[in-house]
């Protein structure tokens, strides 16, 4: 009986046993990289029994009828997102947004993180600002009161306040189950590498499988950290805008511009009239006499001869 056949059979059994622990993640089944067809022709009854023994040891024990089970989804993982909108005097918009950002920075990156900040000055009467934060829930409860008090102190008001939640329970539970299964598989593959009298092709196959499992472990670990970070710290989006005024400088500015431009516009119009007259007058000196002669000639041709009544002589 070849040792390599027994070794590869054990690897396949370990792979199937590790995958059976992750029922919620369908993509965690290891690939059939061991080329079973290459070795299946030499498998004997002894190797089959050894593989069955390893599978039984890796499989979880059957649950007793009275034994309590732990539901993996009994704990919910929710990522909260808060939204606030404030209306402030034009001169207080940028200053208030800057003060809120400074409060977050002073709290430290473990408590609050600034994700984005911008200020937009459209004109002298209208300014807007936006601030995005990620903060710990306990610190955020105190920061909410600070937001409201600072806005009221600046003669502002709250336009909107809301909160939304995203359920990440399924993603976190699935990723955690996949990570545990891959970690167990890695430990067993490392144990097989320590087996003596293994041939070089078998060792290379184990190394490739171990590298693939290690890559999946690192990917799952990173994903799990990101998901738990979203749960442990909430996102906050704050928008600031200028209070609307009934009469502003911008609303009456067209009248002021029209008054200032009156003299210039009148001068331009008068200059246009003078230019038109100066351009037409020379032609009128020539055209008017010609038109008078044509009219006179036309009237002579169209006026009929007067009829002379009987017994009357025409006037001389």
Image (cartoon, grey):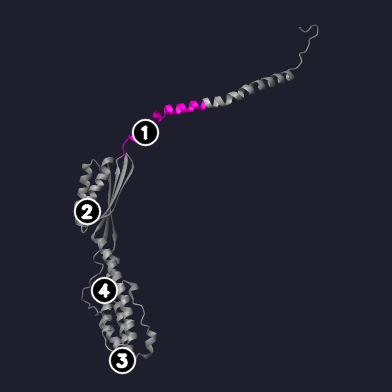
Residue at point 38%, 89% (across, down): 41
Residue at point 34%, 73% (across, down): 27
Q: Secondary structure at mark 4?
A: helix
Which residues make up the magenta segment?
A: 244-273
In terms of sequence position, does the residue under pointer 3 or pointer 2 come before the other?
Answer: 3
Q: CA distance from mark 1 to mark 3?
A: 97 Å
In terms of sequence position, does the residue under pointer 4 or pointer 3 come before the other?
Answer: 3
Residue mark closest to the camera, 4 vs 1: 1
Residue mark closest to the camera, 4 vs 2: 2
Q: Which mark is residue 46?
A: 3
In terms of sequence position, does the residue under pointer 4 or pointer 1 come before the other?
Answer: 4
Q: Quadrant of the N terminus?
A: bottom left
Residue assigned mark 2:
105
Residue assigned mark 1:
253
Q: CA distance from mark 1 to mark 2?
A: 41 Å
Q: CA distance from mark 3 to mark 2?
A: 67 Å
Residue at point 35%, 36% (across, down): 250
Q: Are marks 3 and 2 in contact (CB under 8 Å)?
A: no
Does the segment drawn in magenta span residue 219? no
In terms of sequence position, does the residue under pointer 1 or pointer 3 come before the other?
Answer: 3
Q: CA distance from mark 4 to mark 2?
A: 37 Å
Q: Quadrant of residue 241?
A: top left
Q: Secondary structure at mark 3?
A: helix
Residue assigned mark 4:
180
Q: Quadrant of residue 259?
A: top left
């Amino acid at each position: 009986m070849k040792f390599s056949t027994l070794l590869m059979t054990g690897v396949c059994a370990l792979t199937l046993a590790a995958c059976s622990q992750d029922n919620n993640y369908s993509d965690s089944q290891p690939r059939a990289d061991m080329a079973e067809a290459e070795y299946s022709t030499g498998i004997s009854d002894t190797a089959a029994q050894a593989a069955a023994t390893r599978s039984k040891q890796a499989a979880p024990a059957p649950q007793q009828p009275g034994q309590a089970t732990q539901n993996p989804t009994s704990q919910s993982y929710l990522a909260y997102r808060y939204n606030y909108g404030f209306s402030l005097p034009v001169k207080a918009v940028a200053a208030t947004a800057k003060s809120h950002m400074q409060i977050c920075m002073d709290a430290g990156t473990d408590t609050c993180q600034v994700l984005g900040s911008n200020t937009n000055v459209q004109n002298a009467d209208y300014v807007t600002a936006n601030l995005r934060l990620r903060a710990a829930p306990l610190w955020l409860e105190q920061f909410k009161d600070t937001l409201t008090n600072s806005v009221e102190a600046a003669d502002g008001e709250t336009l909107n306040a809301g909160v939304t939640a995203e359920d990440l329970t399924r993603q976190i539970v699935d990723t955690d189950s996949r990570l545990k299964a891959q970690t167990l598989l890695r430990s067993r593959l490392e144990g097989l590498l320590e087996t003596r009298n293994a041939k070089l092709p078998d060792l290379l196959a184990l190394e490739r499988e171990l590298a693939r499992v290690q890559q999946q472990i690192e990917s799952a670990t990173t994903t799990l950290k990101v998901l738990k970070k979203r749960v442990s710290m909430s996102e906050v989006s704050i928008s600031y805008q200028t209070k609307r005024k009934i009469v502003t400088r911008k609303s009456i500015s067209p009248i002021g511009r029209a008054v200032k431009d009156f003299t210039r516009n009148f001068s331009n119009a008068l200059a246009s009239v003078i230019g038109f007259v100066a351009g037409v007058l020379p032609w009128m000196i020539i055209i008017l006499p010609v038109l008078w002669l044509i009219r006179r000639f036309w009237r002579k041709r169209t006026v009929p001869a007067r009829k002379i009544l009987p017994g009357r002589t025409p006037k001389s």
